[in-house]
Amino acid sequence: MIYFVGPDSILPCCETATINDVVEYCQTKKYLGVDTETEGFDFTCKKMIMFQIGDTTNQYVIDTRHVSIEPLRSVLESKDIEKIFHNAKFDYKFILKWADIKCEHVFDTFLTELVLNCGKKIGFGLADVVKRYFGDTLNKETRNLFIKLEGNPFTQDQIVYGAKDVEYLCRIKWEQRHKLTELQLGPVANLENQAVLAFADMEYNGLDLDIQQWKSLEGANTTRADALLINLDETLTEDSKLEKFVSRYIQSDMFTPIEELRKVDVKWTSPKQVLEVFQCLIPSLENVNGKEMYKHRYRHEIINTYVQYKEAMKLCTSYGEAFLKNLKGDNRIHTSFHQILDTGRVSSSKPNMQQIPADNSFRNCFTAPDGWSFVSADYSSQELNVIAFGSKDPVWLKALEEGQDLHSTCAELVYDKQWLDAAEDNCAYYYNNAKQKCNCKEHKKLRTNVKTINFGLAYGMGPNKLSDTLNISVEGAKELIEKYFQTFPSIKGFLEKLGNYGKKYGYIKTFPPYNRKRWFTTWHPRIHQSKSSSFELGSIERASKNTPIQGASADMTKLALVRIREYINEILHWKDECPIKVVMTVHDQIDTICRDDYLDTWKKDIVMLMEWAAKDIVTNGLLKAEVTVSDCWEK
């Protein structure tokens, strides 16, 4: 039965009810479907106009333009009543903004469907899921009409649409519960459903941006791009192989200063024209995309300059004036997190905060309010710890236990006498047997080579990629990889085991206790018998090595977010404004802002919470967290 709570309605689709009727019904339930309809997508300025709650028996549709949902606070904040959403972050932010209520104990059918089908290229919207489970079609046109309502009464179709969403959510949840049990994915689904509240809080809190400082960076990058453009022109004119691109005649007019006249006939923003230029140097070149240019950038000065020019232009276009369009109604940046990628890692969009340049000049533009500071904590060598734990390599474990610089320790073993001979006077690596990172010129180079392998091989890096990255021959890269694996057979065995598992079963799992599964859609039982499947098997093998490492790292960061949120909401019990807000996460780093009078306590507690979360997965306790305090966002 559908009940409408709002101005008197005589629509035949529903009965009328009061908000007290809704509360009385909901308080007796163990689970409830919850949904909202809004004026738009920006919670900072677009209002929630309809709120729906109920189960498969009764659904209540509340016109929030006329009726407050404050009486439902105890239901929505209850830890005993499960609230079922589809894409909970969206509804959560609107409920928090326009009703000042934080929802607790949620089950997100959107995230759960992603957990069940991780790696599969299928639709995950509510209409897709309803169609997949029940064969029913949702009318998207009705949903779109809420945006243009402009104060008019809800139609019968809109009330029925809102009620059906709630009913479907309850039905979807039970279908998903059976599949979670069957596939043994309950623990990771629980993790994601707890973590979604922390991601919602981060999206809600947002980040303050120093707009003037941001614009000054754009100006500096524009100046740099202009200088590189001039450098490209000059380099081209100095190379005899490229003389056909130099203009014989320079046309001018009375308004153009002579120093601004270009001597070349190349538009450096045109990939087609740039390819024609570079094919004079590398006849086999097929394109000028980033990957291809990186391979050749140190072999030809003009290509290296072109790469720098493209990088500067990228900073101007992506992180200049256009970026400021992402400011919301409250003049803050509120990114949108995508909580589950194929590996379990997180991305974000509108804007993509995971891709903000690592150069702190950009991050430093995001500032803490007066009287507050950024308190950021990150895991120290998170993925290397995961590899050490999974492979049980004795050298890696000993280096981590004793606080050695792992990359230097590995480089010493891989290069042996070459490493020993490279030591300079007062070498920090050998000083008092400390085995720490040093600045000996040759040590630095050898360490970088092995560091590239340490990170790269876990992600399927082969000789060609290593060759391009280190600017060495492919044969040299092959020899280096072979020597590396001879030195660390445990790591080789660990990675091969992961790769073989994925190829054999068509999916790969992350570490216990979550055992997230990633399915490979190109896999089939007879794939090993097909001569044309070598590419697919190679791709599956690389992903099978990558996913458990990235996935386990993501799982512990999400668990840390859950525990930080519990600390804020349950342990502090702050009566006025809470002194801690979670504002961002990028891979292994969690960023909070903290009121300055609580800094000393929070600096210690955030480290404790992150290391506690890590120990659930890397159970040896070697993975540590480090904390920094600043008046702005830092890497």
Image: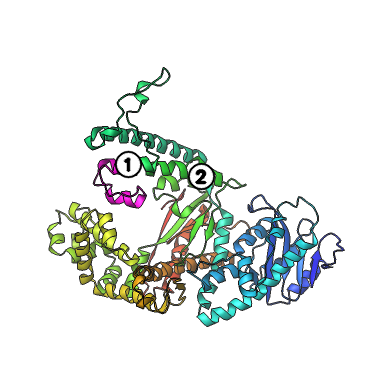
**Nearer the observer, 523 or 325:** 523
Check the image and name the residue furthest to the top: 254
Residue 66 x, y percent position in the rendering: 79, 57
Question: Which quadrant: the N terminus?
Answer: bottom right
Per the image, the residue denoted by label 1 is: 276
Residue at 77 percent across and 55 percent down: it is: 65
Q: Which residues are magenta?
A: 274-303
Front: mark 1 or 2: 1
Instruction: Say whether residue 630 is left or right of residue 284.
Output: right
**Nearer the observer, 17 or 281:** 281
Label drawn at residue 465: none
Give the quadrant of residue 16: bottom right
Total count of labels: 2
Residue at 33 percent across and 67 percent down: it is: 458
Per the image, the residue denoted by label 2 is: 323
Disc 2 packing (10 Å; few <14; some 14–19; many ≥20): some
Check the image and name the residue furthest to the bottom: 182
Callout 1, which amino acid?
Glu
Rendered position, 167 above or below 575: below
Callout 2, which amino acid?
Phe
Residue 364 x, y percent position in the rendering: 44, 46
- Sequence order check, earlier mark of 1 and 2: 1
Instruction: Say whether residue 183 is left or right of residue 497.
Output: right
Check the image and name the residue furthest to the front: 531
Q: Is residue 282 magenta?
A: yes
Residue at 27 percent across and 59 percent down: it is: 464
Q: Are marks 1 and 2 in contact (CB under 8 Å)?
A: no
Tell me the CA gap for discs 1 and 2: 32 Å
Disc 1 packing (10 Å; few <14; some 14–19; many ≥20): some
Residue at 35 percent across and 28 percent down: it is: 262
